[in-house]
Image (spheres, rainbow, N blue to C red):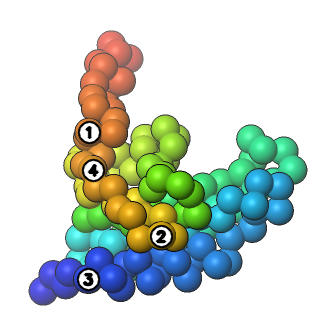
């Protein structure tokens, strides 16, 4: 049976994950709660590194935790950050999310409670178009 979590429970999970973020350089803590198609919740937080290219976002940490647990189908993700406007996943996170869901729901929330909702395909249209059309891929 498919369970759907309430938005409040997903937001609470993302806020809790945010509290564990490691962001000593930017002080910009982000938490994410990823819901699988069966209702399981996987969380992630951003982890910075002094070499910024090695920093990993909360959204990808949540995806990687789910993959490590054997889950590969997702319904939606909630992202919480302390920002003036709700932030959406970066390009790298959008591409990773699109590997496992064609059009999952993205819900971004700031600490003041403002929400922004979008479909992944709205934020990253044509995520796979042309990539596998190379003659060597068949």
Residue 83 falls in image quadrant: bottom right
Q: N-terminal of the two: label 4 or label 3?
A: 3
Label 1 belongs to which residue? 122
Percent x, y of residue 110: 48, 64
Residue 40 falls in image quadrant: bottom left
Q: N-terminal of the two: label 3 or label 1?
A: 3
Label 3 belongs to which residue? 6
Question: For mark 3, does the 10 Å Cα neighbourhood hold few (<14), some (14 to 19), or many (20 or more) residues?
Answer: few
Q: Residue at the location (34% across, 45% down)?
A: 98
> In the rendered image, is residue 55 in sight?
yes
Vertical position of residue 1 compared to residue 52: above or below: below
Indicate the quadrant containing the C terminus: top left, top right, bottom left or bottom right.
top left
Vertical position of residue 55 compared to residue 134: above or below: below
Label 2 belongs to which residue? 112
Do tag 1 and tag 4 residues touch (Cβ < 8 Å)? Answer: yes
Do tag 4 and tag 2 residues touch (Cβ < 8 Å)? Answer: no
Q: N-terminal of the two: label 4 or label 2?
A: 2
Residue 85 placement, left or right of 106: right
138 or 35: nearer the viewer: 35
Do tag 3 and tag 2 residues touch (Cβ < 8 Å)? Answer: no
126 or 9: nearer the viewer: 9
Label 4 belongs to which residue? 118
Element type at mark 3: loop
Cα–Cα gap, marks 2 and 1: 24 Å
Cα–Cα gap, marks 3 and 1: 23 Å
> In the rendered image, is residue 43 in sight?
no
């Amino acid at each position: 049976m498919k369970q759907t979590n309430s938005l409040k429970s997903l937001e609470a999970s993302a806020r809790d994950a945010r509290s564990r973020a490691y962001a000593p350089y930017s002080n910009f803590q982000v938490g994410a709660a990823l819901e699988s198609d069966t209702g399981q919740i996987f969380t992630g937080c951003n982890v910075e590194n002094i070499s910024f290219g090695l920093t990993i976002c909360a959204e990808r940490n949540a995806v990687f935790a789910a993959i490590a647990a054997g889950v590969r189908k997702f319904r939606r993700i909630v992202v919480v950050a302390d920002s003036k406007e709700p932030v959406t996943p970066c390009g790298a996170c959008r591409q990773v999310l699109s590997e496992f869901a064609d059009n999952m729901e993205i819900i971004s929330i700031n600490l003041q409670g403002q929400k922004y909702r979008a479909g992944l395909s709205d934020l990253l249209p044509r995520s796979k178009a042309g990539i596998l059309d190379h003659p060597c891929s068949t």
